[in-house]
């Protein structure tokens, strides 16, 4: 890819001293409350528009009813729907409808030292034709990224390249029939084509995590691709959802497997995105939930995973994909404690485009390697993504309230 124990929560003004006793660096905590830096890229008008949108999204009833109406409008191909969506939620959370359309967003981020992770928003497809379209779009994204220092990585979802039911059957160790085996081989060919082109052009590939009942197939594919293409450096990354109680152990197992088989592990750490769905299915089908019992347990495992990745940074490449300020701060403290260069290409921070600018832009300003997940695609293709961004963050104590708080503080600071 192009270079870009119990965790201690607070290491105030850590002073790093080299083995010879000479100071090599001084740790200054990143001020994530600095809204002037966080929103430096936004004009007064843009800031007020963002505030209005987040105020609307802070209303769970409005978000739920709006999501249902959006699905109906999209299904009926109502003419006003695309226009309205592009002017509001799409504009906030997506880079553009195409790669070229996303160029302005990419350049704007890079002006402030923030890289972009290109993510074609298609998912949940069912036809071979659509799977091949997604594969070709991923390869186009790799070719696009190869010519831009601002784009070191692309992201892909296996559910955009394979049928959900096929992945579920493969995950259950169920024997696939002849037709399904052929279909699964086509899936492997598609993802291999993506990873082959990425390795050839020196661009990273994040393979997103999925629901637990199809994740074994995704893990198998990711491990196979890492073994094939991560011989010299990390090109392919698997994603570890730490809201699952088994993923910390699996991260360590994956590291050991990579060392034994002679390749470099690429690990993207996230908390997770399917909690309600996971718990409901476990309850309905009568098996233990794979989800952590509490948020505290999730935070604990995420921070332990972060510590593990930083500790082993020479032998693996990691991405800390989180909107949690405490976990982000912990990672910076651990990097400083170990005396690692802030911008080391094996250590990357990432947040979603349109969210957590207080983390992203302050990290970039402080010299850390940081990127935005930049989703792009036609409105109909990214609608599921946009609905998730709204529904998952619409509670009074959720991400939108936090985002709105920072925005309102900057509006007050500017006196507008």
Image (cartoon, rainbow, N blue to C red):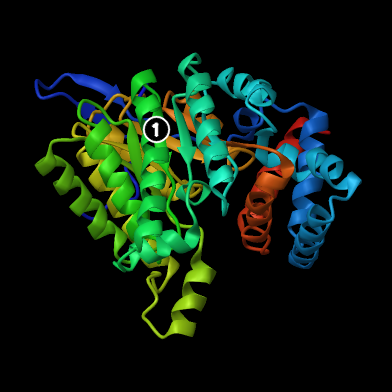
Compared with residue 143, is residue 383 higher up or lower down, i.e. above or below? below
The percent position of residue 120, horizontal first and vertical second, equals 57, 37
Q: Mark 1 points at which residue?
A: 193
Q: Who's the residue at 49% across and 52% down the image?
A: 159
- In this rendered view, identify the residue nearer to me: 208 or 269: 208
Quarter of the image with the C terminus is top right
The residue lying furthest to the top in this view is 147
Compared with residue 263, is residue 239 higher up or lower down, i.e. above or below? below
Drawn side of residue 107 relative to residue 341, left or right:
right
Compared with residue 284, is residue 118 higher up or lower down, i.e. above or below? above
Number of callouts in the render? 1
Quarter of the image with the N terminus is top left
Q: Can residue 242 be seen in this view?
A: no
Q: Who's the residue at 20% across and 29% down the image?
A: 231
- In this rendered view, identify the residue nearer to me: 207 or 192: 192
The percent position of residue 395, horizontal first and vertical second, equals 66, 64
The residue lying furthest to the front in this view is 178
Quadrant in the rendering for residue 259: top left
- In this rendered view, identify the residue nearer to me: 314 or 103: 103
Q: Who's the residue at 34% across and 47% down the image?
A: 10
Label 1: state its secondary structure: helix
Q: Is residue 1 visible?
A: yes
The percent position of residue 156, horizontal first and vertical second, equals 48, 41
Drawn side of residue 303 relative to residue 263, left or right:
right
Q: How crowded is mark 1: few (under 14 residues within 10 Å), some or many (20 or more)?
A: some
The percent position of residue 45, horizontal first and vertical second, equals 83, 31
Q: Who's the residue at 25% across and 57% down the image?
A: 250
């Amino acid at each position: 890819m192009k270079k870009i124990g119990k965790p201690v929560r607070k290491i105030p003004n850590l002073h790093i001293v080299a083995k010879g006793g000479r100071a090599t660096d001084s740790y200054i905590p990143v001020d994530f409350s600095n809204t002037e830096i966080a929103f430096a890229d936004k004009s007064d008008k843009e800031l007020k528009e963002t505030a209005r949108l987040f105020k609307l999204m802070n209303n769970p009833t409005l978000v739920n009813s709006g999501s249902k109406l959006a699905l109906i409008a999209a299904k009926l191909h109502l003419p006003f729907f695309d226009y309205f969506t592009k002017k509001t939620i799409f504009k906030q959370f997506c880079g553009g409808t195409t790669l070229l359309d996303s160029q302005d967003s990419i350049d704007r981020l890079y002006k402030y030292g923030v890289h972009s992770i290109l993510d074609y928003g298609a998912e949940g497809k069912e036809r071979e034709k659509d799977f091949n379209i997604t594969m070709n779009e991923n390869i186009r994204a790799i070719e696009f990224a190869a010519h831009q220092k601002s784009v070191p990585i692309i992201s892909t979802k296996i559910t955009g390249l394979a049928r959900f039911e096929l992945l579920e059957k493969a995950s259950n160790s169920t024997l696939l029939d002849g037709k399904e085996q052929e279909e699964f081989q086509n899936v492997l060919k598609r993802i291999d084509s993506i990873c082959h082109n990425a390795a050839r052009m020196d661009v990273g590939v994040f393979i997103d995590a999925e629901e637990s009942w199809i994740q074994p197939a995704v893990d198998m594919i990711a491990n196979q691709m890492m073994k094939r293409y991560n011989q010299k450096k990390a090109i392919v990354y698997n994603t570890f959802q730490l809201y699952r109680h088994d993923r910390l152990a699996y991260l360590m197992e994956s590291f050991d497997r990579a060392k034994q088989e002679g390749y470099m592990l690429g690990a993207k750490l996230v908390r997770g995105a399917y909690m309600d769905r996971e718990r409901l299915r476990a309850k309905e089908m009568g098996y233990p939930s794979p989800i952590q019992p509490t948020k505290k347990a999730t935070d604990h495992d995420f921070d332990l995973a972060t510590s593990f990745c930083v500790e082993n940074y020479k032998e693996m490449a990691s991405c800390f994909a989180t909107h949690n300020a405490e976990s982000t701060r912990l990672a910076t403290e651990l990097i400083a404690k170990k005396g690692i260069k802030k911008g080391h290409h094996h250590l990357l921070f990432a947040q979603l485009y349109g969210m957590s600018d207080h983390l992203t832009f302050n990290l970039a300003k402080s010299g850390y390697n940081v990127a935005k997940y930049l989703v792009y695609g036609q409105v109909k293709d990214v609608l599921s993504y946009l609905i998730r961004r709204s529904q998952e963050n619409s509670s009074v104590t959720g991400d939108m309230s936090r985002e709105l708080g920072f925005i309102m503080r900057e509006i007050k600071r500017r006196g507008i």
